[in-house]
Amino acid sequence: MTVDAVIIGSGPGGSTVADVLTAAGWTVTIVEKGRNHLLDPDDLTRPAEDFSNDEIKFHNRYFLGPDPLIEPRTFRTSEADGDHSFVGEVNSVPSTVGGGGTHADGKVPRFMPDDFRLLSLLGPQPEADVADWPVSYDELEPYYAEVERSVGVAGTAGANPFAGPRSGPYPMPSGAAMYGATLSSAAAERLGYHPYAAPTAANSVPYDGRPACNNCGFCSYFGCPIHAKGDPVAMLRRAMASGRAELMAETFVSRVRLDGRRSTGVDVVGPDGAERFLAARHVVLAAGAMESPRLLLLSGLDHPVIGRYFMTHYQTIVAGGLPFRTHADRGRSVTHVHDDMIVGDTDSRAAAAEAGLPWIRGGMVEHSGAALPILEAKHYPWGAGHSGLMADSPIRARLWAFIMQGEDLPYASNRVDLDPSIRDARGFPVARITYRPGRHELAASAHFGPRLAAILTEMGAGWTAVTSSPGGGNASSPAAIPESRHNMGTVRMGTDPATSVVDPAGRLHDLDNVFVTDSSVFVTSSGYGPTLTLVALAARAAHLMAGTPPLSPHPE
Amino acid sequence: MRAGGEPGGTGGTPVWLTEDEYARLSAACDRMIPASESGPGALAAGVPDYIDGLLGAFTVDPPRIWAGGPTSGRMGGKAAFLAFHKLAPLDDLAWRMRIEGSLGLPEREFNGPVTGWQERYRLGLAALGDDFLGADPDEQETRLRSDKVFSKLLYEHVCEGMYGAPEYGGNREAIAWHAIGFAGDTQPRGWTDAEVTSP
């Protein structure tokens, strides 16, 4: 049987393509290398009950995968480190049905209109290949609006003064503000910043047959036990309910088969280790910005841009100790953010000039705290003082923090390729990441870090500490590996086949029926989490494939 | 082999460690998180049982790697944490490599040999010395600190056994969560909007 499309990866991008294509009448097979803990195996239109408020399972034992013994990656900061300086867990986005949507806490901001035209707006940067996107905010807006409804996003239109224009309201109002965030937001406002309720893919009211979030506090890095997070369970359930989708979990795509300018389908390795061929009229890669370029390289494609321009977010992490309990363990992990560090001001322009750079951009700043006791316990030294520190809890119960998701510029030297020696358990070469921050990222972090600390001081913090991820130092240390899971840029989108891999519709320049619908295609990284933008691009690509228009914002 | 969900070694009947190793491990855990006026220590929380249960995870079926979902029953709902997940073939491979090591088996050595936790504990506990139990606390601490690689692994497991869900064999009756004012797993109750927003 030849399906209309085989979709590689069941995360937000692949699920969205499955949803749109099945609605248009296509048959699809979704292939996912991880396990299915998201949907009830007896009825794939219903959510499963595998997720739980369990720190050991989700933080210490790789329940969502990938397990670094089975699917390692390798890392180095530059070619000077040799073949690799680290083998293990590198920028792991879950390897499971639902992909990165399962572990994220569901902040789903749109990019700003300016994010799509940095080169025109701000000009080039030394060492980086900053470019405009071949898609504008205005072109993407109807798809942003569609996916905010299909995922289910809670937010407050107009709350962020820097946001782009919207064609309609959010489908749900914002959920409950976390106590600590109300205080840090008030402090930020007193210092002239503009915090707002983060657009979040967690239901604030019952929506789409799923309950409202009950604020359990185990959000970031956990699957949602009650499926109040819509991404991507909402899209997958609809696709399965269409009767036109098949889900193949624990199945690895090892090669996209090519015949001239077309693909005939994919080779897969099933849960029993047996290899087979899946014939398809279209092949959609939605495996993420590590695995999609890896698969293209495993398939023998040799475009020199494949794997280049790997971007994540250079995180500036600012913590403060408060003289009271902030209860960061209640609520959606992050309810408030501010974007002032993306936009910049006179001070940041002066800091750029001082660093010898034409401009610097920070990122969205997340207001959050620490909630997990095992993680806290490991931070304190062992011995006689341990139980006293845990009871007093300066770095969990009495902490508040900002994480700035600083924009990474696209550097050709930051890349994903195939490791020359390390294999996964199925025997295939793993992705190797070569990454180090550039002068821009370091200068932006150095500038904005102390300003974020000043907000925590205004909030009442008795001490503040500024760190970053990656933290620099030895290339073989895990501290050299970025903590951010916002992987982007490794299968670049553009109009010129010499400098990009996919066209503005997400189709490979060289292959008429192969598409990429994940954050690999991003041209620049913005200072925002990639999910909503990759989902909007995936919806757009699927509608272009099927020849259908975006769904009307006001259905009859 | 016991049925899945049946708690392993509670109170001195180790699942995987020898009696001598269990006693030495208990003394080491007591050095890492001793009881104080602020709260219970690792022994009262059953941390040695957590570690012994982890090293012997495959002595029960399904192995005690991932507790079930969606609720523990502590805040309502069913006591589903006790229904541990079955492992898929690659999960089984990963956790056997991690716990048992590669043991020279080609299917576990696709990237070279892997030393398992069982061997690291066996060697690490032996290196503490035959007189470790009788040594005074300062001497015990000095010996633990002399092997930074083993003590780092042990401390990570001690923290998990102290502050993880009780179904994994430690944090007995959630004693450590109570001591620090942590609610633990909150589903299906969660928190009300007022509890989220108010001081």
Image (tube, helix red, strand yellow):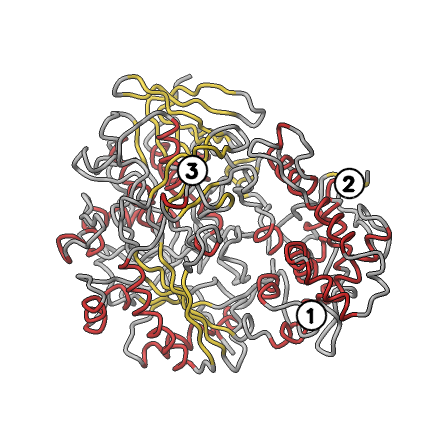
Query: Distance between the Cα atoms at labels 3 and 2?
Result: 35 Å
Using the rendered view, name the quadrant where residue A499 is placed: top left
Chain ID at mark 1: A
Q: Which residue is mark 1?
A: A383
Chain ID at mark 3: A
Residue A388 x, y percent position in the rendering: 66, 76
Mark 3 vs 1: CB contact within 8 A: no
Q: Which numbered disc, 3 or 2, marks the residue closer to the eye?
A: 3
Query: Distance between the Cα atoms at labels 2 and 1?
Result: 32 Å
Q: Which numbered disc, 2 or 1, marks the residue closer to the eye?
A: 1
The residue lying toward the viewer, choosing from B79 and A106, is: A106
Q: Which mark is residue A431?
A: 3
Q: Amino acid at mark 3?
A: Ala
In the depicted structure, whether residue A448 falls above or below residue A111: below
Query: Which residue is rendered at x = 53% and y = 25% of the image?
Result: A270
Q: Amino acid at mark 2?
A: Thr
Please, what secondary structure does the residue beneath circle 2 have? Answer: helix
Residue A478 x, y percent position in the rendering: 49, 53
Q: How many marks?
A: 3
Please, what secondary structure does the residue beneath circle 3 have? Answer: strand
Q: Amino acid at mark 1?
A: Gly
Please, what secondary structure does the residue beneath circle 1 have? Answer: loop
How busy is the neighbourhood of tag 3: few (under 14 within 10 Å), some, or many (20 plus)?
A: many
Q: Earlier in the sequence, mark 3 or mark 1?
A: 1
Query: Which quadrant of the rendered structure holds the N terminus of chain B?
Result: top right
Residue A465 appears left or right of A131: right
Query: Which residue is rendered at x = 50% and y = 43% of the image?
Result: A87
Q: Which mark is residue B59?
A: 2
Residues behind callouts 3 and 1 on a single chain: yes
